Image (cartoon, rainbow, N blue to C red):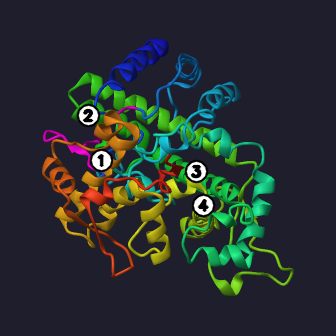
Amino acid sequence: MNKNRGDKLSQVVAALLAMTTASCVIAHGDHSDSGPNPLYHSESHFYVPEGLLSLHVETQDQISKWQQAVELCTPVQPAKPLESSCIATLSEYFMDAPVWDYGSLYYVESFSFGRADPFPLNPRPALLPYGPADYGHPDVPRWQDIFDGKIEPRKDTFFQVAADPKCQASMHGGIQEDLGDHCYAREMYKYAAYLDACATAMRRLKVLNRVTGRAEYKGLSTYEMTLQVVEEEIEDFVQQDMIKQRLEKGYLHASWVAHQCAPHGLALLPLTEEQNRNPGGGFAEVVEVGSDRATRWVVGHSQTVALKISSRSGDEWAVQSYPMTPLDEPEFLCDMYKKYPILYHRHLGSTTFAGYLSRVEQRRHRAQAYLLLKQTFGSRVAQLSYDAADLKQEIDFIQKGGELTLFLPDKESPRETGSESNQEPTDVKVNGKATE
């Protein structure tokens, strides 16, 4: 039975990859760059995100590995430890999977219906969901980059970099690629991703394993309740199967991540500057992943420091993963506009900047991002990211030379014309890659 389900899912994936985001399925994340935009079933209380089932095309070998994992690891039994053979098979599959595919998970919470995923340490997938624009290049972080057997020395490197005056100062400025080696930019990204993955996995498992407080689902875990609600609320059997498969995969991924994190624990910085160094010159202790001291705020502080140093030191994975906000340093916002124009306009068109730009201005930034994506990666990637028909008026505005309101500190040049902004400068990076 499990094998048939795996075969069915593989066929669905193949079909979906040829479609646009019109499909209503449970996905690894919302892929509309305007921000999380789940579809609401009027006859139900369950939110189903709009998007593709997966953002990358899997090889037949990867599909076969997942089918083997389904056979060994399902049906999922909440709170029951996975067998060693299951863990080994999951490693075969997940190690080659993109990190960004697992930024969001959808399920029913105990006291509310809808999207109830615990907010990850890194809010990037919630503020600007990962999508085809992020997968424009083959060089994306995969779990084998995070769980690479170098976690222990990486924790020491994290303490070293966090104490370095130059690296500390870099968090308050723009992007300085010349600090990449000095501040171990790629290592800092990997450690930030490790902290985010470990903390989020433990939180997901805690919520999914606990018994629900809803009387009508008495005795069921959140995981089991979600499966039952899906059967009750979603009439389309294809969608039902996709939702169940996604939840199953997300649960197994969280269990696998928790297993990878357990031997290493979390090396964390104290929250206050007064606690920055103990008499011996070291930092806070290394704590177990499930420790009461590993609160979201404490782990989040260390994750933010690592990701911020990495992004400001020019690591491209970190820049793509960084949740850019209106409160970031002016120098950083300027550098994002100059060096990562697609990502800059995508952020300005997201929910993060909704209170700082008008709805019309945000739609124009989405249109600009669409045009740059089309120019750089082609129509398919652009159309998977934005609906050109919906943005037709804004696209026409830009192509006719209309001005875009920029969120930059330089008051002398707060706008760019569409005719100018649609011409890619030769020294600009597109999603981290220098154009030719």
Which residue of the protein is positioned furthest toward the bottom in this rendering? 274
Q: Nearer the viewer, mark 3 or mark 1?
A: 1
Q: What main secondary structure does the magenta stretch of the protein show?
A: loop
Residue at 61% from the left image edge and 57% from the top image edge:
315
Relative horizontal placement of residue 212, taking residue 288 as reference (left or right): left
Q: Is residue 254 above or below residue 352?
A: above
According to the picture, the residue beneath numbered tag 1 turns out to be 370
Crowdedness near tag 1: few (<14), some (14–19) or many (≥20) residues, C-alpha within 10 Å: many
Q: Quadrant of the rendered structure where residue 388 is?
A: top left
- Could you tell me which secondary element the residue under label 4 belongs to? loop
Q: Is residue 40 above or below residue 68?
A: below
Most foreground residue, 58 or 195 = 58
> Which quarter of the image is occupied by the N terminus?
top left
State the CA–CA distance, disc 2 to disc 4: 36 Å
Give how far across and how far down residue 240 sits, in percent: 30, 28
Q: Amino acid at mark 2?
A: Cys
Report the disc number at residue 24.
2
Question: N-terminal of the two: label 3 or label 1?
Answer: 3
Q: Earlier in the sequence, mark 2 or mark 1?
A: 2
SS at badge 1:
helix
Numbered circle sitting on residue 290: none
Residue 266 pos. (x, y %)? 70, 59
Residue 313: % across, % down: 63, 64
Instruction: Tell me the SS state at disc 2.
Output: loop
Q: Are marks 1 and 4 in contact (CB under 8 Å)?
A: no
* Image spot of residue 372 (x, y percent): 34, 48
* Residue 388 within the magenta-colored segment of the rendering: no
Binning the other alpha carbons within 10 Å of mark 2 as few (below 14), some (14 to 19) or many (20 upward) gives some
Magenta-highlighted residues: 37-53
